[in-house]
Amino acid sequence: MSEVLTDLVAVLAGGGGVSGGDWSAAQLIGFCGTVGGMLWPFFRSRTGMLLVQLVPCLCFAVHYAQMGAPTASALNGLAALQVVVALAIGARPAFRLVYLAILPVIAAVMGFTWTGLPSVFAAGGMALISLARYQTRVAPFRGIMLVALPCWFVHNSLVGSVPAMISDVTGIAVNAWMLLRGTGLTPPSPTPMPPAAAAMPPAAGEAKLS
């Protein structure tokens, strides 16, 4: 991890990073994905969250390929396809069959691109995200994503992807906060006190006391 941070400082300073600049290009694309990964939890609708998730899916597919993480790269490409299919679930329930047919591909991708523990955590995270995107209600969607993102964080720490780790931590924190807000477990926002009622004029025929 310390080597990754050292390389990141070198890239930001214009040193080129690993492999004569390839690392710099990979991280630049990764940080584009980080932006999408940091923004999607703030959207309140399922459709909005899924649309924004297309950005990190596509960016991280390229990022992981350049980082030498083939399982994660292939699964993010598959994730982009899943997002498109998941967007159709609400309006056309028949798309559920098409969507579920994608799930066994995760195991096949892990087998074809096997690199050890990174492949295990990438496939586990992808399977959980697949389950999350199958949901049609926002609360279960966020809850399952809250379990899936730590799997990706472990994978990203193993392959040394700083942008992806930033995205994961942000997603975990924001989804947890939004879930707590939705369940009423967070302190309620202070309610402003209503202005003091104006003194009522005395009714007709009623004498004032002073």
Image: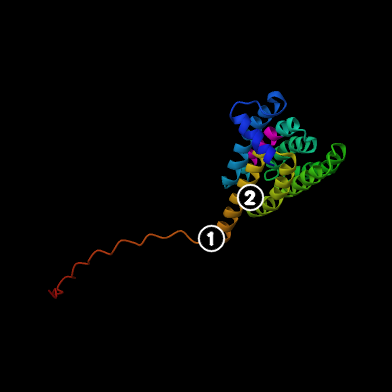
- Disc sitting over residue 172 in the figure: 2
Disc 2: CA contacts within 10 A as few (<14), some (14-19) or many (>=20): many
Picture coordinates of residue 53, whole percent (x, y): 65, 39
Frontmost of labels 2 and 1 is 2
Above/below status of 104 relative to 29: below
Q: Is residue 46 magenta?
A: no
Q: Is residue 48 visible?
A: no
Q: Which residues are magenta?
A: 50-60
In which quadrant will I find the C terminus? bottom left
- Disc sitting over residue 186 in the figure: 1
Q: Is label 2 in a helix, a strand or a loop?
A: helix
> What's the CA distance linking mark 2 and mark 1?
16 Å
Tag 1: amino acid: Thr
Picture coordinates of residue 146, whole percent (x, y): 67, 52
In which image quadrant can residue 208 be found?
Answer: bottom left
In which image quadrant can residue 139 be found?
Answer: bottom right
